[in-house]
Amino acid sequence: MSSGPQPSPLWPASDRTPAALRELLGTLVIVDTDAAFIYLGRLEGADPEFLRLEEVDAHEISKASLSKERYVHEARNIGVRSNRKCTWVNMARVISISRLEDVVVF
């Protein structure tokens, strides 16, 4: 049984992470998707097909009373409440990625 998506054979291991995401590796990020899910966690890996997050809060907004924006502000103020050790997010579903520390508190 596989433990997650396998690296693309087209990308050598040293060159899998897109340059734009390298500076985010190891930091707490917010991954907004085109679905009802938003992910908050530490970015530990990325390739053109998947993001790998650890210590993740995978949150389904459609079952919550808070909007994605409100939920992110709450997480910025009180911290990430992880409910997954590791999650793989399909890059085709990603709308945006940003550092949690870059969220402006108001």
Image (cartoon, grey):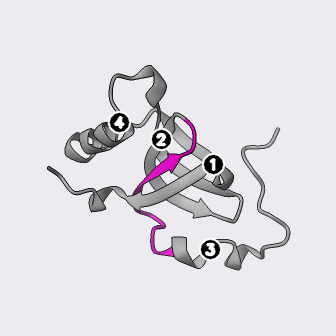
Q: Find disc 1 in the rendering and name its residue.
A: 93
Q: Position of residue 28 (x, y in %)?
A: 39, 56
Q: Which residue is mark 2?
A: 38
- Label 3 vs label 4: CA separation? 28 Å
Query: With respect to residue 35, does 66 lie above or below?
Result: above
Q: Which residue is mark 4?
A: 81
Q: Is residue 3 left or right of residue 44?
A: right
Cα separation between marks 4 and 2: 13 Å
Judge the density around disc 4: few (<14), some (14-19), many (≥20) Cα neighbours within 10 Å.
Answer: some
At label 2, which amino acid type do we have? Ile
Q: Nearer the viewer, residue 85 or 72?
A: 72
Q: Earlier in the sequence, mark 3 or mark 1?
A: 3
Q: Nearer the viewer, residue 45 or 71?
A: 71
| Label 3 Cα neighbours within 10 Å, binned few <14 / some 14-19 / many ≥20 | few
Mark 1 vs 2, N-terminal side? 2
Left-right relation of 60 to 27:
right
Q: Earlier in the sequence, mark 3 or mark 4?
A: 3
Which contiguous range is marked in magenta? Answer: 22-35
Say what amino acid the circle numbered 4 marks.
Arg
Secondary structure of residue under mark 3: loop
Between the C-alphas of marks 1 and 2, the distance is 11 Å
For mark 2, give the secondary structure: strand
Q: Are marks 3 and 1 in contact (CB under 8 Å)?
A: no
Residue at 77 percent across and 76 percent down: it is 12
* Mark 2 or mark 3: whose residue is earlier in sequence: 3
Q: CA distance from mark 4 to mark 1?
A: 22 Å
Where, by quadrant of the figure, is residue 91 drawn?
bottom right
Residue that carries the numbered disc 3 in the rendered image: 18
Which quadrant holds residue 2?
A: top right
